[in-house]
Each structure stands twice: as structure tokens, then as C-alpha cells.
Image (tube, rainbow, N blue to C red):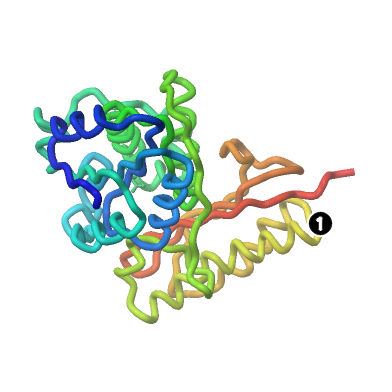
């Protein structure tokens, strides 16, 4: 039975009692099968699993969905119990930010201003700040993040490297619906027609990946993905091919194809691994 903790004092006591390795999965709640995969990965690798559930106001812009972001604690706890999580830390905002919004925040560097950061200024400052706070509070050996938020995963990896945080960051593959739609807490905002349009993201990624498998070069991979993204009900924000560290596109070898698009009022993201054939 997962212990539910609301204060840092309760968390500290529970953490103190844990012997062996500790894995943390940080979430904003509204858990779905993608999160469950993270929990199961943590359960497999660590002796104890802590899940954090906190809708972090710092990472929402003034016109974003902080107030309407789904909050489903009871169902979240059921999933945590089913997987055998040891402790759930679900603090109120005042417990995480007792002095109000922090004036000191982590700077994600240039990568934080690109892609998601371009459309959502300050987003990664907010993400990295809360991730660092939760790392300090949970003191984990391992922390698990989904590949679905690939830029977040990349920046968290860089942060622990750059700031000598003694936690191993583990990336966990994206979970998809049978038709390819990547699971996301925001999918619940989509109407039936919008859900149909949302498929354009994964269709574009699959077209790019297929072009790479055929041995086509980076330009052709990107062009194939653009051609496949063809639903007028979805508005493209970006579609880019980068290296695996999100640096500008490689000419061959491992790469990442990333996409963001608006479907109605909902902004969705997705990405996939690509392997570009060696150039002669
Ligand atoms: O990926 C998320 O749900 C959030 O960005 C995270 C890592 C829990 C930080 O608030």
C-alpha cells in the first residue's frame, strides 16, 4: 500500500526509512499507461519507488492550462498501488514554494530557449527548478523520465551532468495507442475530430522513420515527414531532425525527429528515434 505524503517532513521520514536503492518518478498526476510504464521501469530497477505528483505552477505560462490541468489524485493513487509504489509525495503548492515563487531558478542554457522553449518561454526554467527541488527532497539513486518529453529528458540529463547530481537518469520509451497516438495527459482535451487530426503527428514521424529505413538522407527524411503531416485541422509548430542530444541535424547515424503541433486549443508533441544510413 503506497504511503501518501503531503509534507516535506513526512517525505523525509519515509525516505530515511528506505534502505537499498531508491527510484523516483516525477509526474504532474493525471496518470496514464505511459506513466505506468515509468513506474514499472522504476519498480524493476530500484528497491523502493517514490512517485511525486505535483502540478508545478512555475512551468505554465500566463495563457497556459495550469487551472484546467487535470487533477485526478484518487485514480493516480490506484495506479500507484497497482504497481507497488512505496510512497507518493503529493504536496500542495505552498509546501513546495513556501516563500511564494522562487526568485532563483535553474537556467537551462541555450537548448532551453529552442523548440519547446521557443513557444513556451520560461518553461524549462520552471521544469528544471522543480526537478532539482524534487531530486533534493527525494535523494534518489535513479530518476525515470519519459522519452515522449525528449527535450525535457535531454535537459535533465545535462543538468545532472553539469551540476554533479549523483542520480542516474533513465529514459523510458513512449507508450502509444494502437493507432500510433502518443499517450499524453492532454489527449483528454481532444474532441473525436481533434483526436483524428492529432494522429498527423505520429503519421509524420513514421513517414520520416520509414524514409530513413529506405536509406534516404536527412533532407529526404524531413521532407517525407512534412509531406505526411497533412491534416488541415492540425497546425504545425515545428518538425525538426536533430542529433540525439538535440544539436543540429547529423548527416548520418543516430538522430531524433521531433514534432509539435496545435490541434484546436491543445498543443501536442511527439518524437522518434531515426537511424540515418551512412553517407558514402
Ligand atoms: O513531465 C512532467 O510531468 C513534468 O514536467 C515534471 C517532470 C513532473 C516536472 O514538473
Query: Residue 160: x percent and y percent?
Result: 44, 26
**Residue at the image point whose x is 25% and y is 47% from the top:** 53
Q: Residue furthest right?
A: 280
Q: Nearer the viewer, residue 129 or 137?
A: 137
The residue lying toward the viewer, choosing from 272 and 171, is 171
Ligand 1, by image quadrant, is top left
Q: Residue at x 44, y 55 (%)?
A: 37
Q: Quadrant of residue 78?
A: bottom left
Residue 61 visible in the current orientation: no
Q: Residue at x 19, y 25 (%)?
A: 103
The answer to whether residue 34 shows anywhere in this view is yes
Quadrant in which residue 195 is drawn? bottom left
Question: Measured from the top left, where is residue 170 in percent x and y?
Answer: 49, 39
| Residue 226 appears left or right of 31 | right
Q: From this view, report whether residue 244 is shown above or below residue 129.
A: below
Left or right of 82, for residue 12? left
Residue 155: x and y in percent read 45, 34
Quadrant where the C terminus lies? top right
- The residue nearer to you, when weighing 16 against 140, is 16
The residue lying at 27 percent from left, 54 percent from top is 29
Q: Secondary structure at mark 1?
A: loop
Q: Which residue is mark 1?
A: 215
How far across and down, in percent of the image, does residue 120 sit?
34, 45
- Number of marks: 1
Indicate whether 152 appears above or below 185.
Answer: above
* Residue 243 sits above or below residue 107 on the image: below
Amino acid at each position: 500500500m503506497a504511503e501518501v505524503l503531503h509534507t516535506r517532513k513526512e517525505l523525509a521520514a519515509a525516505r530515511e526509512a528506505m534502505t537499498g536503492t531508491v527510484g523516483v518518478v516525477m509526474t504532474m498526476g493525471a496518470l496514464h499507461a505511459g506513466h505506468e510504464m515509468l513506474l514499472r521501469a522504476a519498480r524493476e530497477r530500484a528497491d523502493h519507488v517514490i512517485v511525486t505528483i505535483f502540478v508545478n505552477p512555475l512551468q505554465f505560462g500566463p495563457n497556459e492550462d495550469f487551472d484546467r490541468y487535470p487533477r485526478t489524485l484518487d485514480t493516480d493513487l490506484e495506479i500507484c498501488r497497482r504497481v507497488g509504489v512505496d510512497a507518493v509525495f503529493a504536496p500542495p503548492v505552498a509546501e513546495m514554494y513556501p516563500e511564494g515563487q522562487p526568485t532563483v531558478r535553474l537556467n537551462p542554457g541555450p537548448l532551453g530557449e529552442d523548440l519547446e522553449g521557443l513557444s513556451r518561454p520560461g518553461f524549462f526554467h520552471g521544469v528544471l527548478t522543480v526537478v532539482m527541488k524534487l531530486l533534493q527532497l527525494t535523494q534518489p539513486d535513479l530518476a525515470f523520465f519519459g522519452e515522449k518529453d525528449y527535450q525535457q529528458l535531454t535537459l535533465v540529463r545535462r543538468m545532472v551532468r553539469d551540476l554533479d547530481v549523483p542520480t542516474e537518469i533513465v529514459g523510458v520509451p513512449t507508450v502509444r495507442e494502437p493507432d500510433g497516438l502518443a499517450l499524453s495527459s492532454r489527449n483528454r482535451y481532444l474532441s473525436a475530430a481533434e483526436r483524428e487530426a492529432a494522429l498527423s503527428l505520429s503519421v509524420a514521424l513514421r513517414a520520416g522513420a520509414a524514409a530513413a529505413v529506405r536509406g534516404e538522407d536527412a533532407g529526404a527524411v524531413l521532407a517525407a515527414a512534412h509531406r505526411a503531416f497533412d491534416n488541415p485541422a492540425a497546425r504545425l509548430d515545428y518538425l525538426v531532425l536533430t542529433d540525439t542530444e538535440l544539436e543540429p541535424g547529423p548527416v548520418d547515424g543516430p538522430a531524433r525527429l521531433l514534432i509539435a503541433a496545435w490541434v484546436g486549443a491543445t498543443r501536442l508533441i511527439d518524437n522518434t528515434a531515426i537511424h540515418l544510413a551512412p553517407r558514402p
